Image (cartoon, coloured by chain):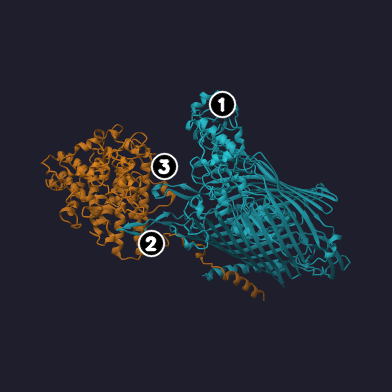
Amino acid sequence: MKSICYTILMVFTFGLISCNKDFLEEDPKTFLTPANFYKTEQDLQMGLNAVYRTPQDRYSNMWGAPCWFGWATDIGYLTPANGHAFHNQPSLLRNDFNSSSDMPWYFWDYMYRHIKDINFLLLALPDVQVNVDVKKQIEAQARAWRAHIYFDGIRIFGAVPLILEPISDVKALNSMTRTDATKVYDQIIADLQFGKDNLTNQWTDAKDRGRITAGACAAMLARVYITMAGYPLRKTERWQDARTVLKEFVDDKKYGNQYGLFDEYSQAFADANIPGKESVWTVNFTRGTFGQGSQVHTDFSPIELYYDSRAGLTRGGGWSNELPTDAFLNSYDKAQDKRYKFTYWSSTADIPDEYADINNSTTGPVVFARPHVKKFRERTPNDNSQGSGIDHYIIRYADVLLMYAEVLNELNDNNAYRYIDMVRQRAGLDDLPQMTQQQFRDHMLLERAWELCFEGERRFDLMRTGTYYDRVKAWNPQAGANIVKGKHELWPVPQREIDINQNLAPNNPGY
Amino acid sequence: MRCDPLKIKKLSACLRLNLLFGLLLASFFSFGQGTLKQVTGKVTDDKKEPFAGATVRLKGKQGSGTLTDGKGAFSLMAAPADTLVISAVGYLNVELSVGSSTSFTAALMPSSNTLSDVVIVGYGSVRRTDLTGAVTQVSSKDLTKLPAANVDQALQGNVPGLWTNQSDRSPGAGVNIALRGSNSFSGNAPLFIVDGFPIASGGGVNAINPNDIESVSVLKDASSIAIYGARAANGVILITTKSGRAGKNNFTINAFNGFKSFDNPLEFLNGEELAALRREAYKNDNVNGGVAVFRPEENTMLQNGQYTNWWDEVTGSGRPTQNIQLTFGGGSENTRVLLSANLYNEKGVVNNSDFLRGSFRANIIQKVGKLTFTSNNNLAMVSGRGVSGPSILYPAMVGNPLAPIRQANGDYYTMLIGVGNTPWANPVAFSESIKSRYTEPVITSSQALEYTVLPGLKLKTQLSGELDSWKENFYVPKALSGNHEESGRVADGFARITNNINYNWISETTVSFNKTFNNVHRLEALGGFSVQQNRWESVIASASGFPFDIYETWNLGASTGQARKPSSDLQKWSMVSYIGRIGYTFNNKYILTGNIRADGSSRFGSNNKWGVFPSVAGAWKASEESFVRDLNVFDELKFRASYGLAGNANALGVYSTQARLSPASFNWGGVEASGYYPSQLSYDNLKWETTKQFDIGLDAGILNRRLTITLDYYVKNTSDLIRQLPVLAVSGFQTGWANLGNLKNQGVELALKGTVVDKEFKWNATLNLAANRNKLTSLGDGTTKIGTTHWVGEPIGIGARYMIEKIGIWQESDRTEAALYGAKPGDVRYRDLDDDKKINNNDRAFHGNLTPDYYGSLTNDLTYKGFDLNVFVTFEKGRTVYNGLNYKLLAGDGYDNHRREILERWTPENPTNKYPRAALGYSNRSTMASTEFLEDADFIKFRSITLGYTLPEKLTRNIKNAGLRVYFSAINPITITNYSGMDPEDGDYGNTARYAPYPITRSFIIGLNLNF
């Protein structure tokens, strides 16, 4: 009788209990975890979608981001009317641009946020049952973005910690050091080569427009090579590597024959044409309700229009965040170069069709205190509070041609003229006369500025050509007054990070 | 549900072993004694009524007992040398030597304040004299001194070391509780256990009618709480509900009815005074040519001399508090029943605030042979309407007396607050028109089956469940929703339904063993296993833009406004626990207890799924030693010490150790595509916070126990504090959670109970006193503070007392020096600590305390013949409150309303150092927190004064043993304090807080208790 009683009692109790060890495991339903996500191809694609979303921060969303690498260059400066320390610090290069400044921290944070997303995706990849080819395409796109980010990082901060797998352990993080630059470059090259070798040449489906292609990786690889060949690494053997990949791209059409220049410079910046034949690598923006509109155009548009009651944000107003320097404006062949007229405006009278009512009113056109950049603006009226839908070029085909010309000149190959002249011809300029190698170099620095100005590469072009200090000193009175040679070539590592992990000290020289 | 058969086998094998061991022990130590004879007897109570259910046993012989039957009769076998011990809970023991007699009679006298009381502890009960830990047991009588809406309110002032603070005084509101100080950055909520069932939801505790409670045990030291393991670090509150008493069929009616008034310590300006202030402010700051601006409505009011007193418009006296309770308790030897029904209805002093509770309880104990089945069931419905601090109380406090309630066309007036003419809440409109009510049905049920295997060896299994469904229906009518900031100023009506449902169940099995060997060795052992799971679901649906107000919340689909997304949530947690206790008492002098619990919790990180919490305690009953007895001083003298561990698992939120992905959609070719990125790491090592506590205590009784003393000193060191800290952004994250940091609480507690006069006039007094000191000892990573909130070496949260110091008002003679600070005569003057002629963050220092230096209560019970008088006082010393509401109420701009104290403001003619000059835009003082608004919140509160009269028996005898008591209570009749805000129990309010506290309610109650 007793044992029956015990048995009943125990069955009663234990029958209700799941003694399985799963009983103490959490199984959340209201959010995704890596444990319940990354199971199917669709999950991986969703992970990849988020990876494509993040660069919008770097090219548009972060405050003034489109101007970060144009300020304190020979061609761009911050309007003196801007009172934000955040903008003034990196533009004026006074002592208040230091390791506690916001902008280096924002960029650092953005970099590693993005790398974290990519590394999580790459870590999950091997265990998902998906077609090998699909998997490779996903891996290649993710790795291409990682290469892009580290390439940014190394050009902005110098040596940075290289993280290739998610790290959560506080101890491991706090003992981390900055990785030698050549190691970071090795990884960048490996990632881009993987993309070059595995990605498709062209995404055919309309919904895949703007994805990274083999050509994008090849062109980025060329940019990496010419950067390594220049200051500060001076690995001149990389000119040859660059030539190889650029020849494949331009002459052999190995990465597809879809690339070319539009007949007119202006066509390259029309919404409908990006992505298009001049797009090698772009950041996708969409006007509208998704919060994915670009702020690039508002950063460059005149604040005079913003304040004018007849115009405002919907009719081309903006923040005047970056203006062209006088020296740069004067460098153009203003009469011949079509790019000059398309790139700048000084009053609404420069766009008669859209501003007819204002121009013809009794008060007349709105005249800006300084010429402004208009190459990124959309036709008005538009609602700039939604941002612009114009995608932003990371690499444009004209840049590929100019890189090719530059590389050939460095290798004393006279074919250099062929490719630079393609770009010049479209701009309405004559072919370049025969020059010495050095004259060609000097001219190339100008030609790149005329063609690619304000698209985000200027700072890096000056840096790799070793001309940063001299050009800024000579052309940009705003930053030139304060620039320190050997210091401002790099940004400081954020103090917050050094405070947490002393191994990241010392900071870059001068900070 | 899946089961691992292997594990079951192991467990049951283990339990069997335990049982076997028990059986062996039992058979080994039971021994008989010769020349037994049958003895019989009858037991009555003090009123000569038969006493059923009393225990009759032979002294020193465990398992020899029997119970008296329905007629109070008993019979058992005893030897002439034996002594009969007759006992019952709540009565004094009677001892009778058997000798040659075979028939006995005994009358049990009710005990009050005796040492034979039984104290409920975790998984059992002990005689108070045998207690090794620090436990305060509050009786039913003490819990019902005040007409408390819930248990937390009822506990106020009754437990030394339990600091309570009623910052929200609206009907039915809960109480802030900290037992022996703050243990954590994550809150101080103790674990509530009702009849052995750990309650997971707030509703489960609020749904208990305080009149259904037999006792509440508050477990404070490590040895008492360790048996509740990972959830016990903030203390454990054990609630035991009443049960029927065999042979005493008892009907009780308790009813009371009360009316409320309230005392608002804040007095406001009338319209004329406010206008004068505004004129002076314009003049002082020379704005608008020194001429004050008034809106047309304000001018009309001024001309008519009619002013609105907003506070009076939304409050009122004479609101009822009603309670009616019907109870039946009784049964026979084998079946005991307690049934009760209760309706409680409280209307608040702020218009349209109320709290309602209906509860129905059935507690049944059924014995069948060696089996006892206990069933405790509560069915309750709680409902209430709160009032919003931001929308009603705040505008009622600062509302402009020159603003009308309604416009000429009858619509509510809205331009009520501020210089900026922002349409703002009209508190009368919101109070009258907003539909807001929560309803909360709560069901709790516990069934337990106990099997007495052998005398002293028991097997018990309990299964309990709780269902709590909280729902709020909230509607802001069309005319007001555009001005209702809390729901986002949406047009044309705002409706919201929130439903949170909580399911909680536990299954628990214990084996207990209790035996005395050779009259000197008492051994107690307990082992058990428990599994608990909780599931919380939530749905929120809201809509705005309605064609009519008529739907309120009952037709959300009729909304024509912009679609609002509904939201839903699910949170589950589970625990598996093993418990063990061993106790040994030698010669009734030396007591040693060890408790242990291992808790596995789903909340813990995957590398730390199990926590083990051991404790030990010892006690020495010195009064049992002959050398102490010879002193003839102590009736009781006991020294206690304990040490052990407890955890705070609830500092970890459900799923807080889980990695998360968040959405980041991306637009591909014009089509929005879902995207997800890792937004939180998993914290595989994250675990409970651990509190190690040492307690040393003393229990003494002198003067024939007319004076009893309980004194405790404790030190608690809490480690592995759960906190968020910055991590290297290289990880891709900026912050992470970790177990890092230590804090310390130490304190003393004193309880003094005395019978001051013990004649026909009787006077009992109880004094509770406690002091606690809290200190953050380290943050574990070498840092010295968290933001400006927590500082190593200071009490946690000290940042709230880090502020600049007001040293007076700039006077005319200081004009030049004041100008250095950009101030004028009449502005507040602050201490410039670094003397840099600027008042900024660098001039901050610590001022005042966050917690009291000491606090306590004093209860006086006086009886004379049929009269009884109870006076209950609580007090607190040393806490400061940051009353930043005065920043607004003493702004001196003459826009929103002001306290009358502003009439004593600085003027050249009145060079006071107290209140600054009239000024616009707060230009007369710093926006920073300053000591100007830091106030001492010391208080002495008379919580209740109750005068009762029990009708003489001869008047009620005709109604079969009936007892009738009528009483009159004054609740919160007197508060003595220098605090200038609403009530010294207020929390801190920042300078810009748009909030106001609910006033304290004073009420007068007439009640009756009828027993028959």
* Percent position of residue B739, x then y: 51, 50
Foreground of the two, B261 or B239 = B261
Q: Considering only order in the chain, which callout, 3 or 2, is on the residue closer to the N terminus?
A: 2
Q: Secondary structure at mark 1?
A: loop
Residue at 60% in and 71% down: A12
Residue at 54% in and 57% down: B474
Q: Are marks 1 and 2 on the same chain?
A: no
- The answer to whether residue B279 is above or below residue B158 is above
Name the front one of labels 1 and 2. Answer: 1
Foreground of the two, A61 or A94 = A61
Q: Which residue is mark 2?
A: A38
Q: Are marks 2 and 3 on the same chain?
A: yes
Q: Is residue B438 visible?
A: yes
Answer with the quarter of the image where residue B331 lies. Answer: bottom right
Q: CA distance from mark 1 to mark 2?
A: 70 Å
Q: Which numbered disc covers residue A496?
A: 3
- Which chain gets the cyan colouring? B
Q: Is residue A301 left or right of residue B605?
A: left
Q: Secondary structure at mark 2?
A: loop
Q: Chain letter for mark 3, please.
A: A
| Amino acid identity at mark 2 | Tyr
Q: Are marks 3 and 1 on the same chain?
A: no
Q: CA distance from mark 3 to mark 1?
A: 45 Å
| Amino acid identity at mark 3 | Arg
The hue used for chain A is: orange
| Amino acid identity at mark 1 | Gln
**Mark 3 residue crowding within 10 angstroms, few (<14) / some (14–19) / many (20+):** some
Q: Is residue A241 left or right of residue B236?
A: left
Q: Which residue is mark 1?
A: B811
Q: Chain letter for mark 1, please.
A: B
- Residue at the extreme right: B100
